[in-house]
Amino acid sequence: MTYSSLPFIYIFLPLSLAVYLAVPKKLKDMALYLESLVFCGFMGIKLMAFMVVYCLVNYISGLSVYYIRPKLKSIPLAVGILFDVIMLISFRHSYFAYLHGFTRLSDAVFPVGISLFTLSAIGYLADIYKGHSKADKNFIRFSLYIMMFQRLIMGTIVSYDTYVHTLKKRRINITELGSGFICFIKGLAKKVIIADSLFVLNSAVRSTSIQELSAAGAWLGILAYVLCLYFTLSGFSDMSVGLCRCFGMKFSGSFNYPLFGSKIRVFVSGWHIQVLHWFRKYITSPLSSKTDNPYLSKLVFVMVWMLAGIWYGFSTGGAVWGMLMGIAVLAENKLNNRKRAKPNGIIYSMLSITLMMVFLSQGSISRGLGYLWVMFGGNGNLADSAAAYMLRYYIVILLIAVYASTDLFRNTIARIKDMRFGRIISAATPAVVTAMLIICTSLMAYSGQSDTMIIRL
Amino acid sequence: MKLAEKITALAVMTAITAASAAAVFNGNFFRNMADISSEKLLEGGFADELAEKTADSFPFAKELRAVAAEIGAKAGEPVVNRVYISEDRLLSADEYSLSAADNCTAAVNAFSAGYEGAVYFTAVPTSTGIYGDSLPSYLLPVTEKQLTERIYEGMSSDIRKIDAYTILKNLSENYIYYRSDTKWTSYGAYCVYRTVIQKLGFIPVPYDKYAIRHVTDSYRGNLYNRTGYMESRADILDIYEYDDGTEIISCTGIDSQGVSHEISLYDMEAAESENPYDLYLGEPMEFVEIKTTVNNEKALLVIGDETADCFIPFLTKHYSEIAIASADNFEQVLEKYTDTKKYEQTLFILGMEHIAENYRGE
C-alpha cells in the first residue's frame, strides 16, 4: 500500500488515527507498532514478517554493539551492517541472483523505502559504536524507528536520538492535525497531479527507440525525468512529514527547492537533505578525517558521491551521475566563487544537473552517452511530430512543474502574508486543500491508487 | 493561520470520514473484499487489489472518474486509463504484443489439424485498428494491422482467411464502430457478413431487405466505462430483422456452471440493464446451440468471443443448425458439449481485444 491510494487515505488513515487518539498515552507506541505491522501486512504477510525479522536483527545488533566488550564491538557492528546491505542489494538488484531469489518474496512484494530505512539502521548501529548514542532496550520503540508506517515510504531520515526526542515531544491537537493534512495533501498533489503526468511523458520518450528519437524529444524526456524524480521524492517526503504531524510528530522535510538554484551547490544543499547528510556524516567525514592530503580528501568526496549515486540508481549510470555530481561540486567550489547573475546561474545549474541526470535516468554509461548524443542532434533529427505532440499536450504540466519546483510561490505567500490579500489566501486554505484532495481522489478513482514510481528506493 | 489549519483539519476529516463511511457501508465493499485471494494477502498484491476494490465501491466513483477524464482531456494528453479521447470517439490505447498473434495462430492451427471440415478465420479489429491512425506511435508500438498480418502469415494454408480489416477500413466513413466502445456495430458486422457468407457458400441477404430497429440510442460502451468521460457521444444499438419465413426453433445456452438456459437472439430486457450489449444473445454463455427452420441440413460451428454476438443473427438465415463455442478455452468447451464432426464448417470470429488478452502467453 502506498500513501497515494484510496484504501490508505480513506480507510487505513482515519482508522489508525482514531485508534491512536483513543488509546492511553502509555499504549500509543504499541498502537503505532501494531498499525505499522498492519500497514506492512497489506503489502503481504511475508513482507510483514520480513520487517519484524529485519528490526529484530538490527535491535540485537544494536544491543550487542552497546553491551559487548569494546574490543569485540566491531563484530556485531559488521554483522548488522552486512545484513542491512545484503538485504538492500538483494531487494534492489539481481546481481546476486541467489540472494535475490532467496530474499525476494515475490514480484508483488517490495519493501518500498528499504533504501532509506537501511540508512537509518546503519546510522543507528554506527552511532552506538561511536558512543554517540545508546542502544534502545525497548523493541517496540526501536522497531518504530525502522518501520513506523508514517515514515516507512521515503520518510525523513533522522538520528535515533532525534527520533526519540521527537517521540517524547509529540503532541496532537487540531492545529497540528490541520497542518499535517495540508502537508500530506501537498505531497499527494505533487505525486498524483504532477509526478504521474510527467511519468507518462517520460515513459512516452523511453518507449521510443533511441535511434528514432529527436533532439527535442530527448530534451523533453530528460526534463520530465528530472522533474518527475523531484516531485515523486519530495511528494512522498511531504506526505510522510504530514502524516507524522497528524500523529503529533514534527520532522522536517527532505527537499528545499533544489532545482532552479543559481549554483549546483544549491541543488546539493536542498536535495534529499537528510540522505546526503547521512553520506557526509557516516562516510565522507570519517574517511576524510583519516587523511591530511587534500587530493585524497577530494577523491573520497567524489567516491562517496559515487556511492550515493549507486544508492539512487543501483546501476553504472547511477554511479557516473554521483561521480559527476561530486566533481561538479568540487569544481564549482574551486572555480566559481564569483557571484553570477541569477538567470545565468539558473541556466548553468539546471543545464548541468539535467545533463548529469541523463546517466541516472538511462542506467548505463553507454545508454547515457547515446542519449546525450541524441540531445545534441546526433541523430540528425532536431525535432519531429512526436516531440511536437508531446510538447503540445505536456507544456502546461511542465510549466506548472517548473513553477512549483521553485520557491516563487512560497516567497510570494510569505511576502503578502500580512497584507489583506494574504488573509484571503489564509482563509481560502481549507477550501483549496479539500479541493486538491478531491482532485487527487478523482485521479486515483480508476485503479484506486497512484503507484507509478520513477525510482524505487 | 492557526484558524485556517483548524478549519482545514475539520474539513479534511469530514471529507475523509464521510467518503470512507460511504465506501465501507456500500453493499459492494465487503462482497468485493471477499473476492481477494488469501494468497495475495500472504505473497503480496493484496494492496493493489484492495485499491481496485475500494475504487469500485467508492462513493461518487462515476462522477470522480468523470472529473479525472475531464482534467485529462482538457489539461494534458487526452489519454485516460489507457483510452485516447479524440474529438469524435474514444479509442482504446491498450498495447499488443506480437507473441499474442503467434499463440493465437498456434491454437487455430492445432484445431484445424484435428478437424475434418473446412475452417474459416476472421480477426475483427477494434475501433482503434480502424480509427487509430491519429494516435501517437508510442501508444501503439504494435498496431492491429501488424497483428492481423502476423496471424494470417502464420496460419496453415488449409484455413481460409477472411480479411475483415480491409473491408472495415474501406468503410470507415460509415457507422461501423461504436464511438464509446471497442466493438463493431451491427452494420459493421453486416458488412463483413457479406464477404464471410459468400466464402461459406451462400448468397448474402441484401441490405435493403432488412428492417433495422434502433433498440436504444443511449448506449455507453466499454470505453466510456473505462473513462467516465461524459462528453463522449452515446451510441445506437440496432437489430437487423428480415422476415423470409425462416424461424428459430430453439436457442439454448449453457453457462460456465454447466446450467442450460433458453435464450433468444435478441434479449430486449438486457438493453435496459447494466450491460446493454447483452442485447445480442443475452448474458455470456460457454456454448450456444441454435436450431432454425432452414431446410438444408447444414450445420456451422462458430468459435467466437463477444465480437461474434451481433454477427450470429445474420448467419441464422443460412443454416439449419449453428453452434457457438466461447473462444475462452474453446478446446475444453467443445470437448464438453459437442462433437466437432457434426459440423462441416467452422468459423472463427475473434476480436483483437480477445486475441491480445487471451493469447498474450503470460
Image: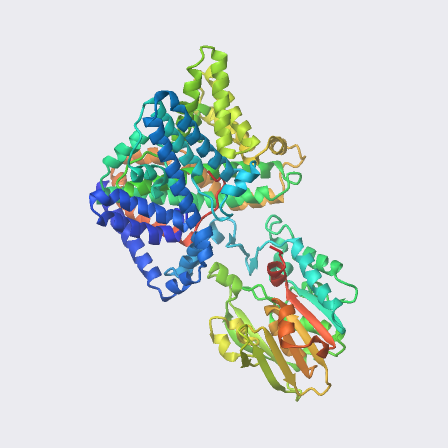
Which color scheme did the rendering employ for the protein?
rainbow
Q: Is residue B88 left or right of residue B130?
A: left
**Eyeballing the image, is B177 above or below A231?**
below
Judge whether residue B203 can be spotted in this image. yes
In terms of image quadrants, where is residue A258? top left
**Eyeballing the image, is A50 above or below B114?**
above
Judge whether residue A395 can be spotted in this image. no
Taking the spot 73% from the left edge, 70% from the top edge, the residue there is B120
Q: Nearer the viewer, residue A191 or A122?
A: A122
Q: Residue furthest top?
A: A292
On the rendered image, what quadrant is the C terminus of chain B found in? Answer: bottom right
Q: Is residue A400 left or right of residue A221?
A: left
On the rendered image, what quadrant is the N terminus of chain B found in? Answer: top left
User: How many numbered marks does the figure carry?
Assistant: 0
Percent x, y of residue B44: 46, 51
Q: Nearer the viewer, residue B155 or B239?
A: B155
Q: Is residue A264 left or right of residue B198?
A: left
**Eyeballing the image, is A45 above or below A57?**
below
Percent x, y of residue B181: 55, 64
Percent x, y of residue A159: 33, 30
In terms of image quadrants, where is residue B54? bottom left
Q: Nearer the viewer, residue A85 or A415?
A: A85
Percent x, y of residue B304: 64, 70
Taking the spot 48% from the left edge, 52% from the top edge, the residue there is B72
